[in-house]
Image: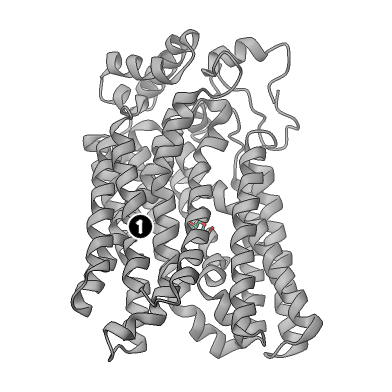
């Protein structure tokens, strides 16, 4: 935290409100934009329940076709993530979110009203395009609008919305199971999508995008809405200076200067997925059921797991700007490894059919794993990729990292059940444990602390230059931040 002597000056310099908080306008911006995260979570989560009832409308549906309904969203998301970067650079962050909201509405309504199976498949790809786009543009837009001191919490509204969306989708699936109304399960997502559209109309363009497009006066106007009056000039100057100092073109993304940051984003993305989170999110009920739990107990355990995910994300929001990203990332990932190891050991000792205390230990370990993800790798991945790139390549670089995340998600999701058959539960979870430990070592060596720093100063640090005057956070290993 900023110390008492520096609080007033640092606060003004960083654009916080007079009351010391981040200010209503920027909280509103983050909350509205995070509806994109809610849709991301809801649309990825809802399918598990909807799948159970598709045969009512499509009696000849095969299991391969069901897998397609699930996984085509991930393919669409990978494509959407790549496309959205270009669009967000060219026309701005705000119009990109508006278009994304429209694509969401079209996709979920097409899914809800699909007359034939092929339309449902196309609709899932369309929803995927919107999910992929939202997943990169939401953290980017919030990150560019947020004052440095609260950026960790505000950007992580997105992760809170993702986890809440997943939880809401479980509850909707559960509530509609009696009526078997899979169309409504899909269609309900149109409500947050419309809210996202209308809410975004009330927002302004990202100041950082405006500065990189030489629209300084507009940037000043936006900053005056989002910041305490005394902070505007200072922040604008820093953005301008950053934009000049870092005037790199998208083509330069692969230059030695930026290659390190690009690799960091991509590896964070891949580690977020290959450490197994979505095998738990998508398959936990199946896994718990086949491990000996009755199906209603398995569903209940799944809902509790969703609550743990949301609850620990709230804790992360509280801690990110206090203890820093690096500490949470490394601690959380160690916790994930412990949870995975315990699950693997329980499977090894208890065999594939767990009963009594073995089942309870496995479930507690599962909750511990999810909670550890929620406090570290879940929010920190999306936060860091919104922080570590210079403004001019931010959208393209975030697109690449986000694409890597969806591609890795796809690979893990489609290979998980095959893996379970080939090397059993214990083998699979030992493998995840190993990959998680590799992630810890990588994070320890490569992830910088970005807490409290201005975006311009973070990318300067990543490129190996001196930190600018706005820097208030500690470097890794330097102990407490000022
Ligand atoms: C990940 C998703 C995952 C979710 C679970 C997100 O950060 O990107 O793949 O489903 O967290 O909470």
Does 125 sit above or below residue 269?
below
Q: In the orientation shown, which residue stands out farthest toward the right?
A: 357
Mark 1, residue position: 189
Q: Nearer the viewer, residue 156 or 165?
A: 165
Does 357 sit above or below residue 392?
below
Q: Nearer the viewer, residue 233 or 449?
A: 233
The residue located at (54%, 17%) in the rendering is 17
Does 178 sit above or below residue 128?
below
Can you see residue 257?
Answer: no
**Image quarter hosting the C terminus:** top right
The spot of residue 106 in percent (x, y) is 22, 57
Q: On the picture, is 48 further left or further right than 10? A: left
The spot of residue 147 in percent (x, y) is 51, 25
Does 278 sit above or below residue 28?
below
Question: Would you identify the image quadrant in which residue 8 lies?
Answer: top right
Query: Can you tell me whether the CB of the residue at mark 1 lies under 8 Å from the nearest atom of ligand 1?
Result: no
The residue located at (51%, 22%) in the rendering is 23
The residue located at (39%, 64%) in the rendering is 407
Does dot 1 land on a helix, a strand or a loop? loop
Q: In the orientation shown, which residue stands out farthest toward the front?
A: 179
């Amino acid at each position: 935290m900023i110390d008492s002597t520096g609080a007033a000056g640092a606060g003004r310099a960083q654009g916080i409100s007079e009351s010391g908080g981040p200010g209503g306008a920027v909280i509103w911006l983050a909350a509205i934009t995070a509806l994109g995260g809610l849709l991301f979570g809801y649309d990825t989560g809802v399918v598990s329940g909807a799948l159970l009832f598709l045969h009512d409308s499509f009696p000849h549906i095969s299991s391969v076709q069901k897998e397609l309904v699930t996984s085509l969203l991930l393919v669409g998301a990978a494509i959407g993530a790549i496309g959205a970067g270009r669009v967000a650079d060219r026309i701005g962050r705000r119009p990109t979110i508006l278009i994304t909201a429209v694509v969401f509405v079209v996709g979920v309504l097409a899914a809800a009203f699909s007359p034939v199976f092929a339309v449902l498949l196309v609709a899932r790809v369309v929803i995927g395009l919107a999910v992929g786009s939202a997943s990169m543009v939401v953290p980017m837009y919030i990150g560019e609008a947020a004052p440095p001191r609260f950026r960790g919490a505000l950007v992580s509204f997105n992760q809170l919305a993702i986890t809440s969306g997943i939880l809401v989708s479980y509850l909707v699936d559960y509530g509609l199971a009696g009526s078997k109304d899979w169309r409504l399960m899909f269609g309900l997502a149109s409500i947050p999508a419309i809210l996202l559209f209308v809410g975004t109309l009330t927002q302004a363009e990202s100041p950082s995008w405006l500065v990189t497009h030489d629209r300084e006066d507009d940037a000043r106007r936006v900053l005056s809405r989002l910041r305490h009056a005394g902070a505007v000039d200072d922040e604008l100057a820093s953005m301008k200076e950053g934009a000049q100092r870092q005037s790199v073109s998208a083509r330069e993304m692969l230059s030695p200067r930026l290659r390190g940051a690009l690799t960091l984003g991509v590896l964070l993305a891949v580690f977020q997925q290959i450490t197994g989170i979505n095998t738990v999110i998508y398959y936990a009920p199946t896994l718990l059921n086949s491990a000996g739990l009755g199906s209603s107990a398995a569903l209940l355990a799944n809902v509790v797991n969703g609550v743990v995910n949301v609850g620990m994300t709230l804790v992360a929001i509280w801690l990110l700007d206090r203890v820093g990203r690096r500490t949470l990332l490394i601690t959380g990932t160690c916790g994930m490894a412990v949870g995975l190891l315990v699950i693997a050991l329980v499977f090894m000792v208890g065999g594939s059919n767990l009963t009594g205390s073995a089942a309870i230990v496995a479930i507690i370990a599962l909750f511990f794993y999810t909670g550890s993800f929620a406090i570290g790798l879940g929010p920190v991945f999306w936060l860091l990729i919104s922080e570590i790139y210079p403004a001019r390549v931010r959208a393209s670089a975030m697109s690449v990292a986000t694409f890597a995340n969806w591609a890795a998600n796809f690979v893990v999701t489609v290979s998980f059940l095959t893996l379970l058959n080939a090397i059993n539960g214990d083998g699979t979870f030992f493998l995840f444990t190993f990959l998680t430990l590799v992630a810890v070592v990588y994070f320890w060596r490569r992830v910088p602390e970005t807490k409290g720093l201005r975006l311009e100063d973070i990318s300067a640090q990543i490129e190996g230059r001196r930190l600018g005057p706005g820097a208030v956070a500690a470097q890794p290993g330097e102990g407490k931040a000022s």
